[in-house]
Each structure stands twice: as structure tokens, then as C-alpha cells.
Image (spheres, helix red, strand yellow):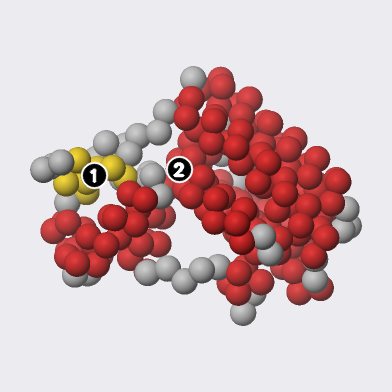
Amino acid sequence: MTVAERGARARPDLTAQLRDAILNAEFAPHQRLVEADLSAQYGATRASVRTTLLTLAGEGLIERLPNRGARVRAISVGEAIEIVEVRVGLESLCARKAAENLTEDGAEELRALRTALETAVSTGDLLGYSRLNQDLDRLLRALSGHETATLLLERLLAQSARHQFRLGFLPGRAAASAAEHTAIIDAVLARDPDAAETATRTHLAGVIALLRTRD
């Protein structure tokens, strides 16, 4: 079992599936989520679908409308920018803690991720690169050992992920992002908390700047 897996909280499979589907734009903003349809699509009971929708509403991914069921919540670019601004402090803290607490097992996972990220960019696998970015975020949170920051970040990341997912497909963005992520990984591997924090802040400042061009 990897560090990230040990650090992850158990979640119902259906919740994870529907969350990923929303974040990967399989459901559009404002699209209605009908319990019967989701039950058939995912082979789940209506009760489990209802529980999942309540969970995702709590995460801010969907909204429940009186007498109209649930729909995917649309998050504006302005709101996405505010979310990333809040993430700066939390992710910088996690990067610092990861550098301070790094184990040999964690270092091995980081090196493997760095290689996978570089391969995805060099082969033009943008979807794979996006998923690896999420893996890196999860790993850094797990390595940090900071439960409060992790809880807050998981909710914030879920809300802003759709916008960041789209940014990854802009021309040249993957290569620039890969360099930024490599800088974070190298700083953590060097067990340099200050460099890890600086690299994280630089990366997220770039995300904010790009989001502002989309507003």
C-alpha cells in the first residue's frame, strides 16, 4: 500500500465515481442529476445514489433544488480564482510538511510520479497528465500528515478542479505546469521546506494568472 493510499480516507465507490465524472466534465454545469438515471447508469440503489448526492452537495459540487432534484453546480471563474487563492496557503503548508516529514517510501513514490509526469508531457498524453497531477496533489497531502489542511483542500480542490482541468489543455500549459510540478517534487525530495513552499506558491500563482485570462 502506498503512502497516498494509507493517507486517503475511505469513500463509497459510487461517491468517488460520480465525483470523478463531474470533475472530468462528463456531466455539464447545471445538468440535472436524476436519481433513477444514476441508479441505472452506475448499477446502484436509489438509496446509495441519494446519499452520494447529499455528500457531493456538501462538497459544493452539486446543488439540490426544492422539488426539482439535484444538478451540477456551476462555479464561476471568479469563484475558482478565490478558491485557488485560499489553496495557496494550505498547499504551501502541505508542501512544507511533506519536505519536513519525507520518508524513503515517500521519496520513491515522488520519483516515480516525476518520471510519469515527464513521460505524459513528452508523449502528449494530456488526460493522463491531468490525472497524474491529481495523484501528486494527493501524495503531497498524504506526505504532509496534516489532517486539517487535507480535509479543507479536498473540498476546495473538488470545487475548482473543472476549471483547472480545462487549463491543462491550453497550448503549452502542460509543459509549463510540468516544470512547476517538478520544482515542487525536487524541493520536497531535497527536504527543503522553504523551497517547497516557494515552488508551490509559484505554481498556484500561475494558475491564478491563467484563470484571470479566462474571466
- Identify which residue is drawn at 80% across, 65% down: 101
Instruction: Name the residue nearer the viewer: 49 or 147.
Output: 147
Q: Which mark is residue 177?
A: none
Q: Does 120 sit left or right of 10 as displayed?
A: right
- On screen, residue 122 above or below 52: above
Distance between mark 2 and mark 1 Cα atoms: 16 Å
Query: Could you say where residue 61 lies in the image, as x and y percent from the top left?
Result: 37, 45
Instruction: Name the residue nearer the viewer: 207 or 166.
Output: 207
Query: Could you say where residue 42 lies in the image, as x and y percent from the top left?
Result: 25, 65
- Identify which residue is drawn at 23% across, 62% down: 49
For disc 1, the neighbor class at 10 Å (few under 14, some 14 to 19, many from 20) is some
Residue type, label 2: Gln
For disc 2, the neighbor class at 10 Å (few under 14, some 14 to 19, many from 20) is many
The first of marks 2 and 1 along the sequence is 1
For label 2, the SS is helix
Q: Is residue 66 visible?
A: yes
Query: Could you say where residue 54 lies in the image, as x and y percent from the top left?
Result: 29, 55
Residue type, label 1: Arg
Image-quadrant location for residue 55: bottom left
For label 1, the SS is strand
Please, which residue is most extreme toward the left here? 67
Number of the front mark, 2 or 1: 1
Image-quadrant location for residue 5: bottom right
According to the image, label 2 marks what residue?
159
Q: Is residue 112 visible?
A: no
According to the image, label 1 marks what residue?
64
- Quarter that holds the N terminus: bottom right
